[in-house]
Amino acid sequence: MTIASVSIVDKLSNEKELRSDADPDNLIKQLVDRYRGKIVHYSNHFFLTTFEGPSKAVHCGIDMQDAIKSMDARLAIGIHIGECLVYSDQEISGEAIDVLKDVQARVQPDQIVVTQTVKNLLSGAGLNFVHWGSLLNAATGQRLPLLSVKDRLREDMETGSIDFYALSKNDSFLENVLQSIENHLSSEQFGVENLCRDIGISERQLQRKLKLIANKSPNQMIRSVRLHRAKELILSKDRGIAEAAFDTGFSNPSYFSKCFKEEFGILPSALWS
Amino acid sequence: MKPNTQYTKSGRINIAYQVFGDGIVDLVYIPGWVSNIDYMWSCPELVEFLTSLSRIARVILFDKRGTGLSDRIVELSTLEERMDDIRAVMDAVGSKKAVLFGHSEGGSVSALFAATYPERTISLITFGVFAKRRYAPDYPWAPTDEERQAVYDMIENGWGSGDMNLASLAPSKAHDARFMDWLASYFRSGASPSAALNLTRMNTEVDIIGILHSIKVPTLLMQRTHDIDVKIEEGRFISRHIPGAKFVEFDGYDHLFWVGNTKRFLKKSPLLSAICNLPKNMKKNL
């Protein structure tokens, strides 16, 4: 199981002055929940959490660090994957937890440090890693490399001085993009500009982020979603080809057929028959 | 007897799946690399294999996101998303727990799934599985960066064509024009050239060695001794790292399990006996 430890290591403002809706503890709980994680231990601004997979844990960590900045607090986050025993809602143990605690003891504020085991499973998650150190396993005498996480997109944005406030994790970002396109499926006028406005990020950010996680430009993405939904409509036999095209934002049936052939390698009429 | 293709959502992505057979245990087949569940049914050798499986199991086939009949809106998928796709399909057919049968890259994803969700995995069965696809001194059987680059170039310049050296996946069929034509079409219908290239590049970075010792479900690994694509040493290495895993070698050179000495594989297969010999209490209401 993927496990993450989160410490609020440095609070610059007086805790008593924080509003309850700006409580860093609350924020962490909300984000863990949003990424379908579970908090299995909490004490004095220290969290032990479990996640379904390493990508969700890392992206949750990135979001936490971004969000916590507005609260004058800083986070140190360690992530490992291994076997654990969860006894109850507040009790977890195992060798992986011991490793994670060793990692956590070394992590500095504003860092997310993962073990090599985690990094090896994160191919394609849009992240860069920098060698950061290693842990010695006393039992085996082997060293476990540690790496600090760099969000590729955030690095781009920092060098390009783009505001990344509106961005959330890759998964929900993609969900938001797909949702927005589907909400405006029948509107032929809906384009990249509308999509950016709808999900609240700049065109440049949208372009970079989509390229990174879907290998598509925004226009390709819009067209692809429309065509996939058109294909669903045709296959369900609820609509004729012209209707399906119209319902997914293609007013010109021959242009629709041409795009469909490009996307799926067959003409829509082949599906209908 | 091609089953109907159905769709379920994994997040907002449609995943195509088929379910067939009337066995009392569920088996999810996780194909390697790229796949097309409709096109599988136009290969008689594969049909024979799937039909045999369906006599003892309820078989669930699917194409992972970005490939085959599933949505190709997204061309990339992390190992985690591929696990989510398996889970989505199991949920769609009401399977609480299943035998996972993973081929090649599908074996790596199955292994991670088995380690992550032991409560949903009856047992793990793989054919031609690898733990990583990049040479390292402690895993010297994987391709070097130069060898991987040659694969990228082949995909980019001749996706699905004769230049792909597909014969190395099925040497026993190298002179069977019908089969080789099917195999090339199968890959072409499984992914676009750019999706195949991205997937292959991503697979180069994957390494599941660190999670192998966490697999605690019964595990059976199978491979042909002279497999050209994945070296037999890789299978042996993986079996040593999974507690209690059984490793079975078959004669032959084929990486594809459904060609070559299939009769022995099908009739005396440890795969079938592994499923048939499941304890009764594991079969019912899983």
Image (cartoon, coloured by chain):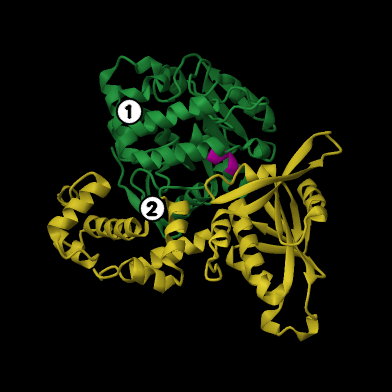
Chain colours: A yellow, B green
Image location of residue B200, percent across then percent down: 46, 36
Q: Nearer the viewer, residue B181 or A107?
A: A107
Q: Which residue is mark 2?
A: A216
Above or below residue A184? Residue A87 is above
Horizontal side, residue B103 vs residue A159: left or right: left
The segment highlighted magenta reads: B108-112
Horizontal side, residue A65 vs residue B67: left or right: right
Q: Nearer the viewer, residue B257 or B50?
A: B257
Q: Amino acid at mark 1?
A: Leu
Image location of residue A128, percent across then percent down: 60, 49
Above or below residue B143? Residue A150 is below
Horizontal side, residue B119 vs residue A7: left or right: left
Q: Residue at x 49, y 47 (%)?
A: B82
What kind of element bears circle 1?
A: helix
What kind of element bears circle 2?
A: loop
Q: Which mark is residue B183?
A: 1
